[in-house]
Amino acid sequence: MTFHVITLFPGIIRGALQDSILKKAQDKGLIQVEVYNLRDFAQGKHRTTDDYPYGGGGGMVLKPEPLFAAVHHIWERTSDKPKVIYLTPEGTLLSQALAKDLAQQKSLILICGRYEGIDERVRLHLVDQEISIGDYVLTGGELAALVLIDVTSRLIPGVVGNEDSVKRESFYDNLLDYPHYTRPREFKGMKVPEVLLSGDHKKIEQWRKQQALQRTLERRPDLIKDKDKNMKEEG
Ligand code: 6GU
């Protein structure tokens, strides 16, 4: 899968992808991240990418021309006309379910905003989907784009070494994860639950399910309501 990222700060995107699992995924050819500096698509001596808002008020707004030029540049060089996603706190909340949908795409264009926002005409005529990563305001869309790339990439087969762990972890079944233990059997007087040492796989499975359910009820009862709703909708 290819992520085309349009940003004023290519270093933020590149820097975060130089280590660990996403680095390996790129080396293996499972994902590709192409970074485009918005400034390269701006006109004039000063290559201005932002301007004052009509109607006044504070802050600056990203101009439409460089964003249109950048997206068309990418479309002209790709065979599949990738969808355009704008990262903004006004967008649909990113969830595991949305990430699963995104992971079906061959490629995506991600626009990272800065300042007060982008010219509304970009949203109306260029953007297919607006996505937010949570109810708080970041200084720009770059960290949000990285979150989107991370959650989507790890759903692509081969990116995460252990497929089983992807299936078992938090949110996969709309439940939080169960507790994990490793050696030693006793640490500072705290013992590993007996059942995990029993070798009885059925019992272990039951204990994990019960723990996951209990944790979800205590911490995120909203997830269980969502799950009920989803099951009813699916019939
Ligand atoms: Cl996508 N962008 C910004 N600037 N702030 C955010 C966000 C995105 N999602 C949550 N907060």
Image (tube, rainbow, N blue to C red):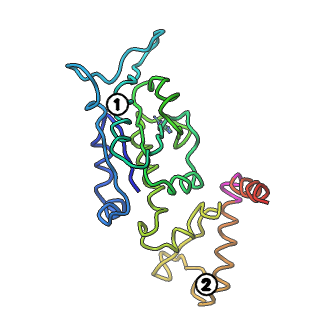
In primary-sequence order, the first of circles 2 and 1 is 1
- Where disc 2 sits, the SS reads helix
The residue at 43%/44% (across/down) is: 81
The residue at 38%/22% (across/down) is: 63
Number of callouts: 2
Task: Tell which tag, 2 or 1, sits nearer the viewer.
Answer: 1
**The N terminus is located in which quarter?**
bottom left
Q: Residues within 10 Å of mark 2 (few under 14, many from 20)?
A: few
The residue at 61%/84% (across/down) is: 194
Residue identified by numbered label 2: 194
Three-letter amino acid code at disc 2?
Answer: Glu
| Left or right of 103, for residue 172 | right
Q: Which residues fall within the magenta stretch?
A: 217-222
x, y percent for residue 101: 56, 54
Residue 167 magenta-highlighted? no
The residue lying furthest to the top in this view is: 55
Mark 2 sits near ligand 1, with its Cβ under 8 Å away: no
| Left or right of 92, for residue 82 | left
Query: Front-most of 35 and 192?
Result: 35
- Where disc 1 sits, the SS reads helix
Residue 69, disc: 1
The residue at 35%/41% (across/down) is: 76
Q: Is residue 153 above or below residue 6?
A: below
Three-letter amino acid code at disc 1?
Answer: Ala
Q: Is residue 43 above or below residue 212?
A: above
Q: Residues within 10 Å of mark 1 (few under 14, many from 20)?
A: some
x, y percent for residue 210: 70, 72
